[in-house]
Image: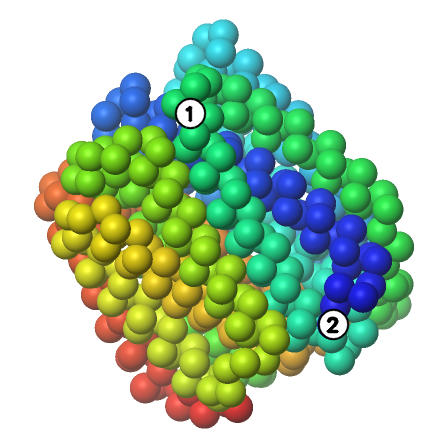
Amino acid sequence: MSFRYANFNWFVVGSFFSRTGDWFDKLALNWFIFSITGSAFYIGLVEFFGLIPVLLFSVIGGVIADRWDRRKVLIVSQVGAMICTFAIVIVLMKFYSFILLSVLLFIRGIFLAIEIPARNAMIPNLVPKEEMTSAVSFFSTILNASRIVGPMLAGFLLGVYQAPILILINACSFLIVIYSLYKISPVEQEMTPQNSELGVVQGVREAIDYLRFHPFVLGVFILGTVPMIFGFPYSTLLPVFAKEILQAGPSGFGLLLSANAVGSVLCTLVLGWGVVKIPKGRLLFGCIVGFGAGLIFFAFSHWMMLSLLLMFLVGVFSMGYRIVERLIIQETIPDHMRGRILSIVMMDSGLVPLGNVLIGFCSVYIGPVLALCLMGGICILTASVVLLKNREVISVS
């Protein structure tokens, strides 16, 4: 198992504290914006500015991850994100400005765009190849454990402290991450002579050519992108459902996110221990369909216990398809191109802001219930069409 390796353990410990702080930040900021504006559209707009850099700069981050030492890249990106987070706290506490807040979120998002491909590309440098499935699954387990702890604690603390205090806690959590990265001594990453002089244009061209000549990887990437646009932005509407439909307040908002995270953790544990024997292609399709259906049923629920159960199932299916997609791609791509290919594959995270704005816009004109149903239905329909066009993906074992 991957936990036998100290490098991997330091890596996941730092990641756990970082992502727990991120959930403090997300929940507090979303609640702060909704309390001021009373509009889900502004929540989507804030998340748009925070995540759109992942779409714009992720490929550049992938080139950086392949050209320079990934551990050092992570340290620099964490320091930059920490400084931006402290600045956000000052803006919220001293002189609130939506424009300045959006600028700071955008800058922090650039550091996130650099971090994501470097962090995921470094996992194979921490464990032997035969432990890759375990490492990817249990890394996802740790991250999703933070989704349980983070929202639950944040929901409780929001009832006691103001939102900027929680974001300040996130800023301080970066110190733990930076320390953990200093403790890691990863295996030297595979480098070709061209990597040391790799430019952005050349690096992007090579990555695109790889995808062009490997339609199987391209098909998996396209399939993984659909739910990220039309499904994952459901979190934008959760404050609305918690406050106006379920009448549960900030603690209920935190519980919904935590129930979702519990499902995600259970899924990663099951996949990590190799309990599920379903072929990866069929599992990928089944999880996407289950994810979309879960969103539709959640939209019509007015009972808190049922809503928590549905959020749990949404967490199971959403994490299932994400892990299977990552496993298929990680097992296929070469290490010297890992950062670039993963940066393109993980650009789907950068598409979430587009979905956030779309679902926020739809909720204004057709209401949150129909908006969430629409997104879930599109997720199922589009995924089905993609898989029908590329049978090789669904047949992978």
Residue where numbered disc 1 is placed: 158
Q: Quadrant of the N terminus?
A: bottom right
In the image, 259 versus 220, the foreground residue is: 259
Model colouring? rainbow
Horizontally, residue 329 falls left or right of residue 277, namely right
Horizontally, residue 141 falls left or right of residue 366, namely right
Name the residue rendered at 88%, 63% in the picture.
188
Q: Position of residue 117 (x, y in %)?
A: 65, 56
> In the displayed structure, would residue 143 be above or below residue 124?
above
Q: Quadrant of residue 339?
A: bottom right
Q: Position of residue 184 (x, y in %)?
A: 85, 51
**Going by the picture, which residue comes out furthest to the front?**
305
Q: Is residue 315 visible?
A: yes
Q: Quadrant of residue 394?
A: bottom left
Name the residue rendered at 65%, 75% in the picture.
133
Q: Position of residue 22 (x, y in %)?
A: 54, 38
Disc 1 crowd, CA 10 A, few/some/many (<14, 14-19, 20+): many
Name the residue rendered at 46%, 8% in the picture.
95
Disc 2 on helix, strand or loop? loop
**Going by the picture, which residue comes out furthest to the top?**
94
Q: Amino acid at mark 1?
A: Leu
Mark 2 or 1, nearer chain start:
2
Q: Amino acid at mark 2?
A: Met
Disc 1 on helix, strand or loop? helix
Residue where numbered disc 2 is placed: 1
In the image, 245 versus 283, the foreground residue is: 245
* Mark 2–mark 1 distance (CA, rounded to whole Å): 38 Å
Horizontally, residue 273 falls left or right of residue 224, namely right
> In the displayed structure, would residue 209 be above or below residue 117?
below
In the image, 141 versus 58, the foreground residue is: 141
Disc 2 crowd, CA 10 A, few/some/many (<14, 14-19, 20+): some
